[in-house]
Amino acid sequence: MTLILGIESSCDETACAVVRDGREILSSIVSSQINVHTLYGGVVPEVASRIHVENISAVISEALRESGVSMQEIDAVAYTQGPGLIGSLHVGVQAAKTLAFIYSKPLVPVQHLTGHIYANSFVGELKFPLLALVISGGHTELVWMKNDWDYEVIGETCDDAIGEAYDKAARVLGLGYPGGPVMDRMGRQGKEHYHLPTPKTARPYDFSFSGLKTAVLQLVQREEKAGREIIKEDVAYAFQETALGSLVDKTCAAVKEYRPAMLVLAGGVAANSRLREMITERMKEIPDTELIIPPLKYCTDNAAMIGAAGYAAWRHQAFGTWTDSADPGLEMPHNS
Ligand code: KG4
Ligand code: ZN
């Protein structure tokens, strides 16, 4: 039995979890700062790091208390090394190093997006080769994993991440931050009315969302100028159908070419109800590939996923050192 303590602080959630053998969550504490950042219409990095400092000790103590595990029993301390906000990351890195130093435990640095992928281990055993669609506030990537802990990015966004496009489109519509959940709800009430251009990219598995974001802005300005009332639900509908349609088309094309044993969704945008519906429907055409969609609470940032990815890293002896530091632009590890 292996017990990993995971720590996550890359953006605006301070989180700690205890995970057994990468699959079983003994505790998962997430302290969200969302109420504070909502006041500013987005995450304010300096504010985020200060709140992490205030909360991290209590979050770690609570995760240990709830798991019933003592620090002496923990096998390794896994932490998010990057990508993310530098100040926020530092808080988690220092907390992890302090615990590892005091209790003489190995350190396991984890790349945040690998955490989102391994969050799927809480649903079922991952089967390889695996294709992961990683969709978050900062990233949009198709990741090919021939084996466990082996990553190859086969497609990525040429400009904005899909979560970023959601947040910006929501801002144009005056819907507040974060935009994803409210656009999701509003889009369900909308109907086909406005038309938005389908994103185009040079490489088949790359993505592009900045043109779509601009098209939403232009649409709103055009309607305002013409003195017509904007039907926000219909804009959200058009945005979702276009953005998610592109995501699903490209992902299914990659599944048909690569033939993975499993397709997993990962990251905050995987919480989107329309996307979950669309991909489930489309994957019925490709029954040889099993589809896993993580439960909502494991789509957005948490530390259990860092414990799960940390366990995979631990099994591959991917230990860190005392000189490792937070890396805001950290890329996925690549083995093959
Ligand atoms: O993975 P995550 O929690 O943080 C990052 O690592 O970025 O993702 C946050 C992103 C935000 O852009 C948020 O608007 C989006 O996920 N999001 C959603 C939904 N819930 C969260 N986007 C679309 N539909 C949702 N239901
Ligand atoms: Zn994330």
Image: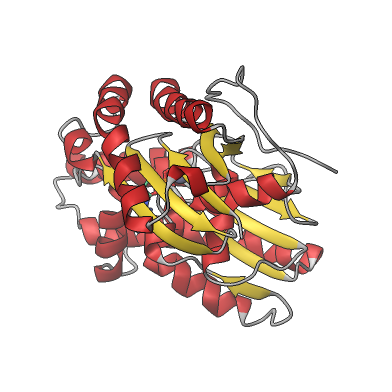
One can see residue 84 in this view: yes
Which percent across, then down, holds residue 15?
A: 37, 43
Residue 11 position in % (x across, y down)? 38, 34
Residue 302 seen in the current view: no
The x, y position of residue 262, in whole percent, is 69, 69
In-front residue for pair 223/216:
216
**Residue located 61% across and 35% down the image:** 106
Picture layout, residue 41 above or below residue 6: above
Q: Residue at x 52, y 47 (%)?
A: 74
Q: Quadrant of the N terminus?
A: bottom right
Q: Relative to residue 40, is residue 245 depicted above or below?
A: below
Q: Quadrant of the C terminus?
A: top right
Residue 82, position as x, y percentages in the image: 54, 31
Residue that extends furthest to the right in the rendered view of this protein: 336
Which residue is depicted at the point 78% across and 63% down? 129
- What residue is shown at x 53% (from left), y 76% (from top)? 280
Q: Is residue 297 left or right of residue 131?
A: left
Q: Left or right: 142 with respect to 273? A: right
